[in-house]
Image: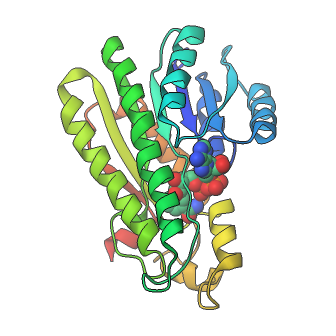
Amino acid sequence: MTHQVALITGGASGIGLETARKLIGQGVTVVISGRRQEAGDAAVKELQSIARDGAQARFIRNDVTDEAAAEAMIDQIVSEFGRLDMAVNNAGISNETATIEGSDSDNFRAMIDTNILGLYFDMKYEIRQMLKQGKGAIVNLASIAGLNGMPWAGAYSATKHAVAGLTKSAALDHAAQGVRINGVAPGAVRTDIIAKQLEGGDDNYNEANISAMHPMNRLGRPEEIANGIAWLLSDEASFVTGHILSIDGGFQAK
Ligand SMILES: NC(=O)c1ccc[n+]([C@@H]2O[C@H](COP(=O)([O-])OP(=O)(O)OC[C@H]3O[C@@H](n4cnc5c(N)ncnc54)[C@H](O)[C@@H]3O)[C@@H](O)[C@H]2O)c1
């Protein structure tokens, strides 16, 4: 992977940051994007300290809900590094644990803006650049909730089903053009997104219950998701496209 260039949206925390650590440790130059400058600066400092083979780390302040900013971000990466080999569309929110009838429509709209439209904007400009190169690999963050119904998370689940649809359809669009597009569907992973849900959720929504949803009876670790993402991005997965890789402690096997 040495001397390649990767973009990871929402890369200053959780699964995105763990993926950035894994890639830069393999000599990949990593651009992370996000809304918070301070978090981005701190992540870049850490990433630069573990970089191998001259790889570089950069942060671009970017909100995925802004389409013009998505185009500008890809232009900025190409003007500095000359190419974009890999992209991980990871930025996402889960802002409510509620039944459909008890949920807030504004929360659903915010999840549509970030999880669906945001991912679509980034993917569009990433693919345009990769087509110019004749090569590229993209991984989108879906979820177990993107492959199955999920009680108390209907709106989030709907947005992650959309991610699976966008991933498979884009993979078909570009399968013969050298651009591979896959997804990962993590089970519950110990990151901020889950911590916030555990704080704000119903009494029945606690760590023991969430762990018990997974046959391995535990939450996942960010590095377990990053390992799958890195494999899908690598040439080892050269005949894999349109696949949603479950990394979920056995959840999908039930
Ligand atoms: N943690 C889990 O259990 C789990 C399970 C399945 C899927 N996922 C998905 O994995 C991805 C990463 O989540 P995580 O668990 O690392 O949580 P996280 O909250 O640490 O990471 C999400 C990142 O996206 C960023 N982000 C949110 N909205 C943004 C916007 N509008 N513009 C730019 N950046 C934005 C956040 O600031 C954060 O850095 C998400 O798409 C999430 O839905 C997480």
Q: Is residue 186 left or right of residue 3?
A: left
Note whether 210 is above or below 35 in the view shown. below
The residue sitting at 57% across, 85% down in the picture is 209
Note whether 218 is above or below 205 in the view shown. above
Q: Picture coordinates of residue 66 (x, y %)?
A: 52, 38
Q: Is residue 199 left or right of residue 100?
A: right
Note whether 216 is above or below 144 in the view shown. below
Relative depth, front residue between 102 and 191: 102
Relative depth, front residue between 95 and 207: 95
Residue 191 seen from this side: no
- Residue at the outermost front position: 106
Relative depth, front residue between 127 and 243: 127
Q: Is residue 11 left or right of residue 183?
A: right
- Residue at the outermost bottom position: 203
- Display coloring: rainbow
Assign the C terminus to one quadrant of the image. bottom left
The residue sitting at 59% across, 69% down in the picture is 219
Q: Picture coordinates of residue 108 (x, y %)?
A: 47, 66
Residue 154 seen from this side: yes
